[in-house]
Amino acid sequence: MNNSPPSDGLSETPGNEKLSFSTKLAYGAGDMGAAITANIGVFYTAYFFTDVAGLDIDKAAWVLLIGKVWDAVNDPIVGILSDRTQNRRWGRRLPWMLYGAIPFGITFFLQWIVPRFSANDAANDWALFWYYVAIAILFNSFYTAVNLPYTALTPELTQDYDERTNLNSFRFAFSIGGSILSIIFVRIIAGLIPEDRIQQYLLIGAVCAVISVLPLYWCIFGIRARVMAVAAQNPNLEQPVSVPIFDQLRIVLSNRPFLFVVGIYLCSWLAVQLTAAIIPYFVTSWMRLPDAVTAQVIFAVQGTAFITLFVWSAVSQRVGKKAVYFMGMSLWILAQGGLFFLQPSQISLMYVLAVMAGFGVSTAYLIPWSMLPDVIEMDELRTGQRREGIFYSFFVLLQKVGLALAVALVLQSLNWAGYLVPTAENLRPIQPASALLAIRVAIGPLPTVALICGLVLAYFYPITREVHAEILHKLRERDR
C-alpha cells in the first residue's frame, strides 16, 4: 500500500499562504456538524431534560455539569495525543476526525431518547439521570475527538495574518449555517409532529446526527492534500511534541497573549451560552409565547450573524481584529441589556434586539479564533516547537469549565427561585415572580457584564498585525 503524501490535484504550492476557494470551502465544512450538534444542545438540552424527559431541574443541572466538565477534561488529553500522533498517510489531526465521525453521530442521537426503565417514577427518574450522564460522557468524548483536531488545523493550513481571518470566516459561515439549518429542521419537525414532543426530539436527533457526520468527510478529503503538502514542506509541523505534559501546561499558562485570548473568548461565549440556555424559558415563561417562537428568535440571531460574518472579515483587513471586536460588542451589549427590560407585549422589539445581538455574535465566532494561531506562533518563537493541540485544547478546556459552571448555576438558580416544571396536566404553568426575575437576570445583566469584561481584555490584547509580522519574520530567519 502506498503511504506517501498525496500531491496530485494540489492547486496551491505549500509555500503559498493564499488558499484556494475549494480548500477554504472544505475546511469550513468541517465545523458544520459540530455546530449543528452544539446549537441543538445549547438551546434545547436543558429544556429537553426538564420539560420533555421529565427530569427534575436539579438532576438536569447535574447532567449538564458532569457532561461539560468531562468535555473540558478530555480536551487536553485529545490535544496532547493529537500533537503526538504520527501517520504518514493522514498526518496528525485527520485520523481523529476520520475514525471519530460515526461514533460522534450515534452518541448525539442517543441523547434524545427518553427510555422507560421502571414503572416506579422515582426509580425511573434516577435511571434516566444516569443514562443521560453516561451518554453525555460518551458524546462529549467523540465531539472532542473530531472537533479539537479540526480546530487545530488552522495554523497548519496558512501562516498569513489576514488569510487566517478569511479562512475562519469560511469556517464560521458553515458553523452559523449549520446552526440555522438545525433550527429549520426543528421548526419543520415540530410542525410535522405537533402533539408528541418526545417523538419530535427523537426525529430531530436522528436527522441532525446524519447531517452532522457527512460534512466531516468532505472536510477530511477536501483538505488532506493541502495538509500533507504543507507538512512535507515544513517537517516541524508534524514533529511530535517532546516537552513533558506539566511543562507544557506551565508554558501555556505563562503565555500572556494566550490568556488574553482565552479571556476574550470566555467572556463572549459566556454571554452566548447563558442566553442560549435561558432563552426557551424566557420566550415561554416571561414572554408567554409558544415554543416555536424560540426557534424564530434563534434564527434572527444566527441569520444576522451569518450575513455579517464576511462583512466583519473584510472590515478586519482594514481596521484590524481588535477594532472589529469592539464594533460588534457595542451593539451586542445594547441588545443584551435591553432584554432585561423587555415586556411581554413588546414582541417586535424582541426581534430587533435579536438582530442587534447577531452582529456581536458574529464577531464572537470570528475574532478570538483568528487571534489564537498568532499566539501559537509566538509560543513557537519562544520554545521552538509547534503545539497547536495543547493550545487549542486548553483554550476550549477553560471555556468549557467556566461555561459549564455558569449554565449549571443558572439552572440551579431557577430551582432555588421556584421554577415550576410543566406536567402532563399543566403544560404551561404560570411561574412565580421569583422564577421570572431569575430568568430575566440570566438573559440580561449577567451576559452584559461578561461582554463588558471581554471588551476590557480586548483593549489590552498585545498582538497587532505589525507584531505578528515581526514574529513570522523572526521564525523565518531562525529556520534558514
Image (spheres, grey):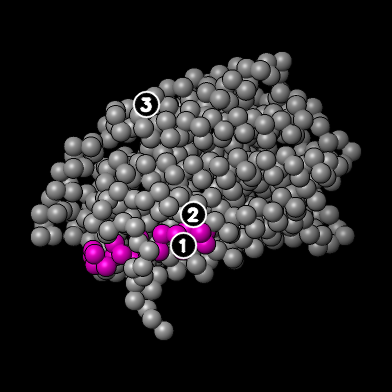
Q: Which residues are magenta?
A: 216-236
In the rendered image, the quadrant that contains the C terminus is bottom left
On residue 196, the disc is none
Q: Residue at x 42, y 41 (%)?
A: 169
Tag 3: amino acid: Phe
Quadrant in the picture for residue 426: top right
Total marks shown come to 3
- Residue that carries the numbered disc 2 in the rendered image: 30
370 within the magenta span: no
- Residue that carries the numbered disc 3 in the rendered image: 326
Residue 186 position within the rendered picture, expressed as x and y whole percent measured from the top left:
71, 43
Residue 134 position within the rendered picture, expressed as x and y whole percent measured from the top left:
64, 62
**10 and 225: which is toward the camera:** 10
Label 2, secondary structure: give it: loop
Q: Earlier in the sequence, mark 3 or mark 2?
A: 2
Q: Residue at x 37, y 26 (%)?
A: 326
Q: Is residue 12 among the parts visible in the rendering?
A: yes
Please, is residue 446 above or below residue 201 in the view?
Answer: above
Please, is residue 275 above or below residue 470 in the view?
Answer: above
230 within the magenta span: yes
On residue 220, the disc is 1
Please, is residue 449 above or below residue 88 in the view?
Answer: above
Q: Is residue 204 left or right of residue 66?
A: right
Q: Are marks 2 and 1 in contact (CB under 8 Å)?
A: yes
In three-dimensional space, the C-alpha distance between marks 3 and 2, rounded to whole angstroms, equals: 28 Å
Residue 447 position within the rendered picture, expressed as x and y whole percent measured from the top left:
51, 30
Secondary structure that dominates the magenta span: helix
In three-dimensional space, the C-alpha distance between marks 2 and 1, rounded to whole angstroms, equals: 8 Å
Q: Is residue 312 left or right of residue 290?
A: left
